[in-house]
Image: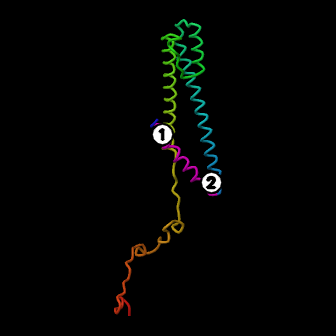
Amino acid sequence: MLLFALGLSATVAPLTATVLADADEGNAGIASGVNNAIARIAGLLAVAAIGAVVSAQFSSALDKPLARVALTPVGRTAVEDARSETLARVDPGETGVEVAAAVEDASVHAFHVGIGIAAVLVALGGVLGLAAIRNPRREVRCEDCAGGQLAGQPADAARERLPVVVVPGRQPAGAT
């Protein structure tokens, strides 16, 4: 999960910032909407695709060990129920230890495949983001920035000036 979180933080925020920075002010709302829509659709497609792969892996991993086991009617029903609930468990008391172990092993295998695919996709996204996303430097006029009123002024303008203290009966220095 830590790898997943690091991958998302390394790709999503810079990608969003780059997309929105590249759009001019008049199209910023459209760019934000398109970016959000693509992110949502990509997430849904990824969940569906990885779910299909996990389900296929579960079924495949379950078929191999059960091919050599004679299932009882209760065991057959439990296995069919497990197939409809990918990553399921069955009661060893009802189905037998060998069937329960096969279902659990298939679940663990399918889970590992799904997590492996997700980790590879996140790492690939991070590498692609690192290599392909460029943050172009924009020129910003100093007058448009906070503190820009000091730009172009002599260095003395930015220095703190000490207050002038006038002592009664004396003229300040430099006064004539």
Secondary structure under the numbered disc 2 in the rendered image: helix
Name the main secondary structure of what is drawn in magenta.
helix
Which residue is at a point 51% across and 49% down the rendered structure image?
134
- Magenta span has 13? yes
Which residue position is annotated with label 2?
28
Q: Foreground residue, 4 or 74?
A: 74
The residue at the point 61 percent across, 40 percent down is 40
Bin the neighbour count of mark 1 within 10 Å (Cα to Cα): few under 14, some 14-19, many 20 and up: few
Q: Which residue is mark 1?
A: 5
Q: CA distance from mark 2 to mark 1?
A: 27 Å
Towards the viewer: 36 or 78 = 78
Sequence-wise, the earlier of marks 2 and 1 is: 1
Q: Residues within 10 Å of mark 2 (few under 14, many from 20)?
A: some
Q: Residue at x 59, y 30 (%)?
A: 49
Is 151 magenta? The answer is no
Q: Is residue 91 left or right of residue 167?
A: right
Three-letter amino acid code of the residue under disc 1: Ala
Up the image or down, 150 lies above or below 104; here it is below
Specify the amino acid type for callout 2: Ala
Residue 136 visible: yes
- On screen, residue 169 versus residue 66, left or right, reads left
Relative height, residue 133 to residue 69 (above, below): below
Residue bounds of the magenta highlight: 3-25
State the image quarter where residue 82 is shown: top right
Q: Nearer the viewer, mark 2 or mark 1?
A: 1
